[in-house]
Image (tube, grey):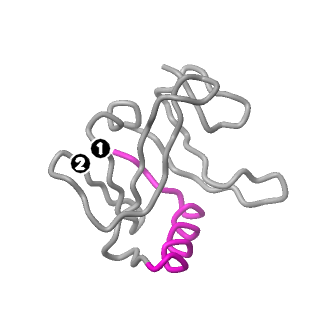
Amino acid sequence: MIQVSETAKNRVVSLMAESGYDASKDYVRVGVKSGGCSGLSYELDFDREMSETDKVFEDNDVRIVVDKKSFLYLVGTTLEYSGGLNGKGFVFNNPNAQRTCGCGESFSL
């Protein structure tokens, strides 16, 4: 399962509305791809559709879609949002990551 903090939920709902998506029926697509300074990097986007191999979760009224491969890397992750003066935006707190880079956007297992 992937969890969504209250601050991330508020930001997701706002960004989805600005982008023409409806948080009550559309999805936040979360994934992992090769790259970044630690080997793997996170992807975050909005989507209206899902494939039959996607995993779907709902937490804190946010519907999350993850492809089967990425799910193995993301199980147990919490999506958070930091928007203060030193905030980085969306942050993935991934218990599976053994090493992360300084920017927090990539990781390795």
Quick check: marks 1 and 2 in contact, CB under 8 Å?
yes
Q: Residue at x 42, y 49 (%)?
A: 30
Choose between 90 and 7: the one closer to the eye: 90
Where is residue 57? Give x, y as percent: 30, 55
Q: Main secondary structure of the magenta part?
A: helix
Q: Which residue is mark 1?
A: 67
Determine which residue is flagged by label 2: 54
Residue 20 vertical position relative to residue 45 in the rendered view, above or below: below
User: Within 10 Å of the Cα at label 2, are there few (<14), some (14-19), or many (20+) other Cα atoms?
Assistant: some
Taking the magenta stretch, the answer to whether it contains residue 13 is: yes
The amino acid beneath tag 1 is Asp
Image quadrant containing the N terminus? top left
Q: Compared to 99, does 93 lie above or below?
A: below
Instruction: Pinpoint residue 68: horizontal percent, then vertical percent.
Output: 26, 38
- Could you say whether the residue bearing mark 2 is in a helix, strand or loop? loop
Q: Residue at x 44, y 37 (%)?
A: 32
Q: Is residue 51 magenta?
A: no
Residue range corresponding to the magenta coloring: 1-20
